[in-house]
Amino acid sequence: MEEKFECLIQGILDESFGMVDDFVDDQLLTGLRQNLLRLRAAHEMEKAGVGKLGFFRTDEEIRGDYIHWLDNHSQDVYERAFFDALNYFIRYLNVTCFTSINDFEFHYAAYPAGAFYQRHLDRFQIDSGRRFSFILYLNESWDADCGGELALYLPNQTLKVLPLGKRAVFFKSDELEHEVLAGVKERYSLTGWLKSV
């Protein structure tokens, strides 16, 4: 696992983002995706918005996804396994990079066909706690014809990342502008932030 962590960290140092395929195994991927699909079928995912507290609003011209926040103390076997890996990563970051991460927040995200999220940063203007963004894709049978890429606005280029199942993407929340492009079918992820609070 530490080899994957090093790849994510080195990616930020070299290119402003890290990416690793096969961050989780097939069993964990399937379990997390089935959790999301159960929530989706039960209408327990809410329309995502932008802003925080009194500034929060939903606007489909900006983003069109549905989300469900995870409980950091969830006892679901798959969420627990993901959080165990995440806590291992946080400890590794704190020891090797002196990041002082001490919290995290994650949600499931479902983007219906045609939904997008316009170019943005992940850190709120009124809350500087989010240090790093972390995305784990939960899709099945995804290829370039499906669209739904993550567009990363790097200093000298725009890079498009396909949301392949088991792929993890990692970057600084306050530095890398990014955008979720529309896809031709529903797109799933586990998205969150490593925080210093």
Image: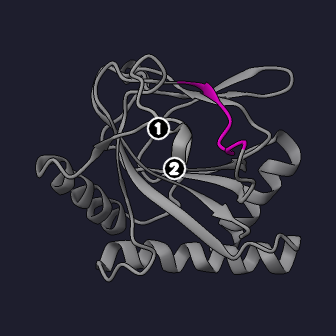
- How many numbered callouts? 2
Q: Nearer the viewer, residue 112 or 183?
A: 112
Residue at the front extreme?
Answer: 54
**The N terminus - image quarter:** bottom right
Picture coordinates of residue 27 (x, y %)? 31, 68
Q: Which residue is mark 2?
A: 167
- Is 22 displayed left or right of 109 in the figure? right
Q: Residue at x 80, y 77 (%)?
A: 94
**The C terminus - image quarter:** bottom right
- Is 149 displayed left or right of 155 in the figure? left
Q: Residue at x 78, y 49 (%)?
A: 11
Q: Residue at x 41, y 47 (%)?
A: 189
Looking at the image, do the residues carrying marks 2 and 1 touch, with CB atoms under 8 Å apart?
Answer: yes
Q: Magenta-highlighted stretch: main secondary structure?
A: loop
**Residue 109 sits in quarter:** top left
Tell me if residue 155 comes above or below residue 95 in the rendering.
Answer: above
Q: Would you call the spot at circle 2 few (<14 residues within 10 Å), some (14-19), or many (20 or more)?
A: many
Does the segment drawn in magenta span residue 46? no
Question: SS at mark 2?
Answer: loop
Question: SS at mark 1?
Answer: loop
Q: Would you call the spot at circle 1 few (<14 residues within 10 Å), some (14-19), or many (20 or more)?
A: many
Query: Amino acid under label 2?
Result: Arg
Q: Which residue is mark 1?
A: 163
Picture coordinates of residue 8 (x, y %)? 71, 56
Query: Which span is picked out in magenta?
Result: 118-125
Tell me if residue 95 comes above or below residue 56 in the rendering.
Answer: below
Picture coordinates of residue 79 (x, y %)? 37, 72
**Residue 66 sits in quarter:** top left
